[in-house]
Amino acid sequence: GAVVSQHPSRVICKSGTSVKIECRSLDFQATTMFWYRQFPKQSLMLMATSNEGSKATYEQGVEKDKFLINHASLTLSTLTVTSAHPEDSSFYICSALSRTGGFGNTIYFGEGSWLTVV
Amino acid sequence: DAKTTQPPSMDCAEGRAANLPCNHSTISGNEYVYWYRQIHSQGPQYIIHGLKNNETNEMASLIITEDRKSSTLILPHATLRDTAVYYCIVSPHRGGTSYGKLTFGQGTILTVHP
C-alpha cells in the first residue's frame, strides 16, 4: 500500500523554540495533506488541510500563526510549531491524499510524531 | 462531531472472530464507510471501506446494512496484534471540500486476549 512517512518520530524541544515536522508521501503524489493532533487517551483532531502550492486551511480554534504549514511540493508538507509551550506537547499525525484519488481511493496516514516541550 | 457511534470497548478471544459494530444513521448518499485502526503510539492504519456492498480484503470484511445506517467490521481470526482502537468513519468518497478530511470519534478499544 501507499507509504506516508513522518520525521522526526520523536522530538523534545525547549519551551519558546520552534520545531518542524515533515510529512512525505513516498510512492505517490499528494495534492492534499492533512495534519491532526492527538492528546493522550483522546481521539485525533484535525488541525489543518495542506494544499500543494497554496495556503493551508485551518480548523476553527487552531492558530495559523503558531502552526505554520508549508506544502511546497507534491510529496512534502511541513508543520512548524512556533514558540512551542508545554501544552503543545502532543502526537502529531499527517495523512495524504493521492493526486488520483488515493490508492484504492483511500487516505493513508503517517506514523506520527511525538512532540514533547520541556 | 463524528457522525458515527461505536461501543467504547470490546473483548475477543484469540482465534475467534471479532465483530465490531458501527451506527451511522445520518449517512449521506455520497458517503462511504471507512474503517481504520490505531495501535498504541502509531498512526491510523487503513483497514477497509465500502459504499453499500459488502467488502472483503486480506485484513477484514465489512458488512453494510441495506439501509446503510449501520455496518459491522469483521476480523475473522483475531490475534493479539489486533488489539487496537478501531475507528468507523463516514466521509465523501470523492470531490467536494470535505474529501479526505476524516472526523474521528472515540472509536472502539478492541482487546484480544489469549
Image: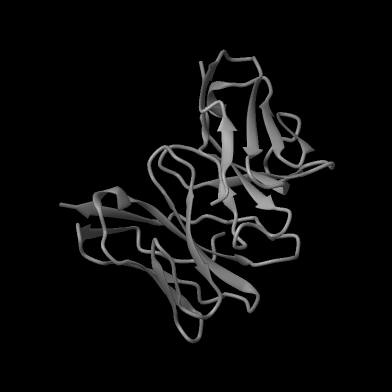
Asked whether residue A96 appears in the rendered view, the answer is yes
Residue depicted at 49% across the width and 43% down the height: B43
List x then y, in percent, for residue B94. Answer: 70, 66
Q: Nearer the viewer, residue B107 or B32?
A: B32
Image side of residue B93 versus residue B65, left or right: right
Measuring 59% from the left and 21% from the top, which residue is drawn there? A85
Residue at 47% x, 50% y: name it.
B45
**Is A108 located above or below residue A77 in the figure?**
below
The x, y position of residue A54, in whole percent, is: 84, 42
Count the numbered circles shown. 0
Q: Quadrant of residue B106?
A: bottom left
| A50 vs B21: above or below | above
Position in image of residue B76 (x %, y %) = 29, 67
Q: Quadrant of residue B22?
A: bottom left
Picture coordinates of residue B51 (x, y %)? 56, 75
Scheme by which the image is coloured = one colour
The residue positioned farthest toward the bottom in the image shown = B66
Q: Is A101 positioned to the left or the right of B64 in the image?
A: right
B100 is higher (above) or lower (below) than B44:
below
- Residue A86 horizontal side relative to residue B83, left or right: right
Looking at the image, residue B2 sits to the left or right of residue B9; the answer is right
Is residue A116 visible in the rendered image? The answer is: no
Q: Residue furthest right?
A: A54
Pick the front one: A50 or B60: B60
